[in-house]
Each structure stands twice: as C-alpha cells, then as structure tokens.
Image (tube, rainbow, N blue to C red):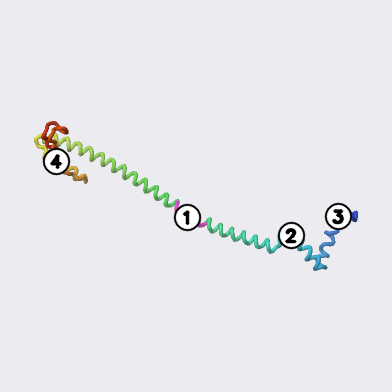
Amino acid sequence: MAMAEKGGVRKKEIEKVIIEELPSLMAESPAFRHQLMGIVAEVFVRKEELKQVLDAIRDLREDFNTRFDEHSRILDGHSKRLEEMSMRLEEHSKTIEELMKRLDEHEKRLESAIGGLGARRGIMSEESFRQGLKGILQDLGLKVERYIDYDPEGIEVYTSGYEVRI
C-alpha cells in the first residue's frame, strides 16, 4: 500500500500488472520464483503436504471402515446370541410353568392321601399313618426323620410327663 501511495498507482492497476507479468517472471527468473514460492508457502499448503494429508485421511477412512465392519460382525453375533437366549428363556419359563402345575397336582394328591390315610386308619393306627406318610414324602424326594422328646413338666403339651413325637 505504501508503494501504491508513493507512485500514485492505484491498487487495481498493480493487480493487473502482476497478473500480466507474473507468469513470465516465474518462467524467466528462478530467484523471483523461489522468493515468491517462499511467501506463498507461508499462506498456502504445498502439493506434497496436501497429498500427505489426503493419504492420511484415506488411510484413516480405510481403518475406520475395517473396524466398523468388525464391529458389525460382532454386533450381529451378539444379536444372534441374544435371540437364542431369549428363546431358551421362553422355553425355561414354559418348563417352570409345567413343573409348577405338576407340583400343584402332587400337593393335591398328597393332601388327599394324607386325608384318606387318617380317615381309614383312625387314631389307633398312628404308626401306620406315619409310615404311609413317610413313604409318600420319600417318594417326593423329601428326607424324613424321627424326633422324640419328653416334656416332664407338662409345659409344652397337655400333661406332665408326656412324650412328644415329631
């Protein structure tokens, strides 16, 4: 701008001269070309630098694509496993439901058998009743133990000196 003011030459005229003369100056003067390239290099990126950046971006894109493909395969595997587990959980739920029904049926049969034994055998045949109940409970996989205690003072049961069998 200082040059434009000193010489009275307007900016547009300077631009016109540069545009017209720059190509021939670049071709004819290696020193001019070198100096101009140094000035321009501070502002603009060189072709080699731009190529390096573009190559790095391309390499990153390829790496990202590879990793995305790998993650997609992993996600597909997880989705498949989740689907399989959901199906197995549904099967287990049905099995549990069936087992609960069978358990209810066994409970009803046990109540009926106990009631029938008590009614048929009466109070006089407690040992027979205990043995029958023991057999039923063992058939269901339960452990049956006999426990006998003595209540000398009659605190826990009706009278003093009463033997308690459980």
Tell me the mark number nearer the camera, choosing from 2 and 3: 3
Along the viewing direction, whichever of 30 and 150 lies nearer the viewer: 150
Where is residue 97 drawn, in percent x and y? 31, 42
**Can you tell which quarter of the image residue 96 is in?**
top left
Whole-number angstrom distance, CA of label 4 to CA of label 3:
121 Å
Q: Earlier in the sequence, mark 1 or mark 3?
A: 3
Q: Is residue 30 magenta?
A: no
Residue at image location 54% in from the left, 59% down from the top: 66
Q: Which residue reaches farthest top?
A: 158
Image position of 25 with respect to 163: above or below: below
Residue highlighted by disc 2: 42
Residue highlighted by disc 4: 148
Whole-number angstrom distance, CA of label 2 to CA of label 4:
104 Å
Where is residue 89 drawn, in percent x and y? 37, 47
Q: Earlier in the sequence, mark 2 or mark 3?
A: 3
Tell me the mark number nearer the camera, choosing from 2 and 1: 2
Asked whether the beta carbons under mark 2 and mark 1 sit within 8 Å of each other, the answer is no
Residue highlighted by disc 1: 74
Q: Which residues are magenta?
A: 69-78
Q: Earlier in the sequence, mark 1 or mark 4?
A: 1
Whole-number angstrom distance, CA of label 1 to CA of label 4:
64 Å
**Can you tell which quarter of the image residue 106 is in?**
top left
Whole-number angstrom distance, CA of label 2 to CA of label 1:
47 Å
Q: Earlier in the sequence, mark 2 or mark 4?
A: 2
Taking the image as shown, residue 1 lies to the left or right of residue 131, namely right
Residue highlighted by disc 3: 2
Tell me the mark number nearer the camera, choosing from 1 and 4: 4
Q: Earlier in the sequence, mark 4 or mark 3?
A: 3
For the C terminus, the image quarter is: top left
Q: Amino acid at mark 2?
A: Glu
Q: Amino acid at mark 4?
A: Ile
